[in-house]
Amino acid sequence: MLLLAPAAACSGGGGGSEKDASRQIDVAPLVHTSAAGEKADPAKAFTVSTDGGNKLAAVTVTGPDGVPLAGELAADGQHWQTTDPLRAGAAYRVKVAAEDGKGGHGETDSAFTTADPQHVVTAELGPDSSGSGVYGVGQPLTVKLSEAVTDPAARQQVERGLTVTSQPAVTGAWYWVDDENLHFRPQEYWPANTTVKLAYDLPGVRISDGVYGGEQRSLALRTGDRIEALVDAGSDQLTYKRNGEVVKTIPITTGKPGFDTRNGVKVVLGQESDVRMSSETIGIAAGSSESYDLDVKWATRVTWSGEYVHAAPWSVWAQGKENVSHGCTGMSTDQAKWFFENTRVGDIVQVVNSKGHEMEPFGNGFGDWNVGFDEYVKHSALGKPVSTAPTGQAAADATPSPSVNTGPSPSAGAGR
């Protein structure tokens, strides 16, 4: 930021005054900076000073992004310092205009760098879009930090460095799942065919005492059609909708008493055309009347603990009539193959009318949609919704409209 010292008043008489006022001098020896000969401490203000009868007329310090830093000039005109924070491990350009009090003036250019950060927080962004980069409309965005951030002010700084933009724009919010993991979801499901970009942009930015942001990360993805599968454990039917239109109704079976399927909204986590499911992974001992060890086809995973929508040719007799599974949603092989081929990661599977407990909001997949949006916003460090309009203000004061995977490693297929 350019700050000007008060200009000297013009004086009458003295035929040489105008000539003296324009006299150019070398002001470099008159100007002193806090970074002379060494790397500057990014935790401290950068200062420029002069002494004697000299004055600073203007100081501009430009950061690595080309934007001048804000600063302030002392009343004596001899001391200036930054008021914007410095980034660690960054290069800065300095331009100083000074006067010697005798009619001489000039400018000097210099540069300095700040010391490298000793402690950085990096971020792993999700979902991993290394494949097709197309996801269902229920897919949350995830951020896994390299270490815990517990201080409220530090969490706010992290959120300010996270930018979500989308076309079309939506209103969403961040949720601190724990000290290292954040999720972002819109107020409602993403619109179909939306382009989404997520960026972590805090390189060298101070997060807390001695802790700075690591390298910048970003990812881009888009959503496909709005796919919703409604699993009704009461009628034993799955209703498959694309963009609000019913495409197919499939007879199913869900969890029997003692193994009731979880109610609530789940998000497809992955798909396996062939998976081994063993009852031992959910605590059922081999040899028990409830034990099983099966090769299962066309399995669409919705929880990390092993709940799938999959082919169950052994229970075709019960499908559409009663619930006999150990928690999964079973259907015929042909129907499971169709469901598998018409579903992708991020699509919605909602279970209703089951006697099972509610889907966990976090820790067993993406249960984010089971948390009301107002409650979701309360778990943001900044405590407000986020507009994804591409204005560079992802944390702007948006108002709600009317209405890297960071989960645990998958367990073996458990049929649960």
Image (cartoon, rainbow, N blue to C red):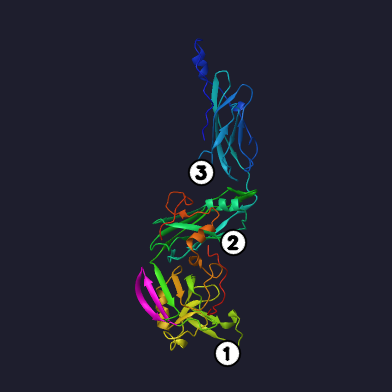
Residue 26 higher or lower than 161, as above or below: above
C-alpha distance separating marks 3 and 1: 67 Å
Q: CA distance from mark 2 to mark 3?
A: 32 Å
- Provide the residue span drawn in magenta: 236-252
- Callout 2–callout 3 Cβ contact below 8 Å: no
Q: Which mark is residue 65?
A: 3
Viewer-closest of 325 and 93: 325
118 vs 131, left or right, is: right
Write down the residue under mark 1: 289
- Above or below for 403 versus 308: above
- Kindly state the secondary structure of the residue where label 1 is placed: loop
Q: Main secondary structure of the magenta part?
A: strand
Q: Position of residue 414 (x, y in %)?
A: 55, 79
Q: Nearer the viewer, residue 141 or 59?
A: 141
Q: Earlier in the sequence, mark 2 or mark 3?
A: 3
Question: Is label 3 in contact with label 1 (beta carbons under 8 Å)?
Answer: no
Residue type at the position of mark 2: Asp
Rendered location of residue 216, percent (x, y): 53, 52
Q: Pointer 1: residues within 10 angstroms few (<14), some, or many (20+)?
A: few
Residue 316's spot in the image, x, y percent? 43, 87
Q: CA distance from mark 2 to mark 1?
A: 39 Å
Q: Does residue 88 belong to the magenta stretch?
A: no
Callout 3 amino acid: Asp
- Quadrant of the image occupied by residue 27: top right
Residue identifier under label 2: 178
Q: Is residue 267 visible?
A: no
Q: Residue at x 36, y 69 (%)?
A: 244
Disc 3 is placed on an element classified as: loop
x and y percentages locating residue 116 in the rendered image: 62, 47
Res 99 → quadrant = top right
Number of labelled discs? 3
